[in-house]
Image (cartoon, rainbow, N blue to C red):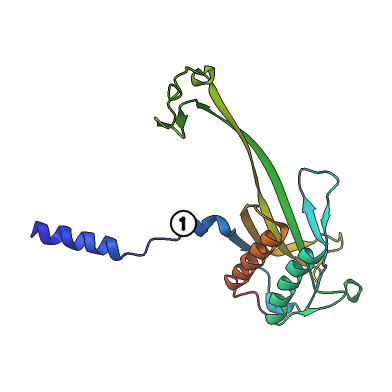
């Protein structure tokens, strides 16, 4: 009986589909939040600029324009149109304003490894292989690297119900969190996929 049980466990493990962990870095983590008091069906029009607010470590960079920004804004615009909302110019008194923001942060790290070890595995390099005791066999190897990470954020701002102090209320927000890697076009495409997921998990966002 014990042999049969062990065989069944082994069989189930062999047939089980392992998660595609190699794809986790290719997608952003998608987080959505909403104002529970907002009546999303009461809004009709919205304004969305093709210029995206860009915040990073460079104080001279404040906006993102060009084809990438237009593609990202266009994808969000299409999602809203598909849910019954109508895009209008800013001077047409829209009910909603859509704000897109990219926040990028660069972190710098240094790792120190004893020579003769690679990621903690002894025996990778024999300092006596060439017949000489090289000085660096007793030293340390320093590896510097950087990680670019941040967030791509979409906010729906209620212009229709601004109070007398012109205080604006954010009624829906989608945040895409993760690392920024590769080209701008690659990250823009990842953001498009991420916002598509954000709208899918927000079925209440409908005219």
Nearest the viewer among 138 and 165 is 138
Q: Residue at x 29, y 66 (%)?
A: 15
Q: Residue at x 57, y 70 (%)?
A: 201
Residue 206 placement (x, y as % from top left): 66, 78
- Mark 1 crowdedness (10 Å alpha carbons): few <14, some 14-19, many ≥20: few
Nearest the viewer among 126 and 180 is 126
Q: Residue at x 42, y 60 (%)?
A: 19
Q: Residue furthest left?
A: 1
Q: Quadrant of residue 122?
A: top left
> Is 78 placed above or below 12 here?
below
Residue 120 placement (x, y as % from top left): 43, 32
**Left or right: where 55 falls relative to 22:** right
Q: Which residue is mark 1?
A: 21
Q: Residue furthest right?
A: 91
Residue 6 placement (x, y as % from top left): 16, 57
Location of the N terminus (image quadrant):
bottom left
Location of the C terminus (image quadrant):
bottom right
Q: Quadrant of residue 165?
A: bottom right
Disc 1, SS? helix
Residue 14 placement (x, y as % from top left): 28, 62
Nearest the viewer among 119 and 82 is 119
**Left or right: where 8 falls relative to 39:** left
């Amino acid at each position: 009986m014990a042999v049969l049980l062990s065989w069944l466990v082994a069989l189930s493990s062999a047939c089980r589909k392992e998660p595609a962990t190699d794809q986790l870095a290719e997608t952003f983590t998608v987080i959505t939040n909403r104002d529970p008091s907002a009546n999303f069906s009461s809004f009709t029009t919205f304004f969305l600029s093709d210029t995206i607010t860009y915040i990073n470590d460079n104080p001279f960079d404040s906006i993102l324009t060009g084809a990438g920004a237009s593609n990202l804004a266009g994808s969000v615009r299409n999602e809203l149109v598909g849910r019954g909302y109508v895009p209008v110019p800013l001077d047409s008194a829209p009910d909603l304003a859509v704000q897109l923001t990219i926040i990028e942060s660069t972190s710098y790290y240094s790792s120190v490894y004893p020579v003769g070890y690679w990621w903690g595995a002894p025996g990778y390099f024999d300092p006596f292989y060439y017949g000489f005791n090289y000085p660096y066999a007793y030293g340390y190897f320093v590896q510097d690297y950087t990680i670019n990470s941040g967030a791509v954020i979409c906010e729906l701002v209620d212009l229709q119900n601004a109070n007398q102090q012109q205080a604006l209320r954010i009624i829906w927000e989608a945040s895409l969190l993760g690392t920024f890697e590769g080209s701008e076009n690659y990250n823009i495409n990842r953001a498009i996929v991420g916002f598509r997921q954000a709208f899918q998990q927000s079925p209440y966002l409908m005219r």
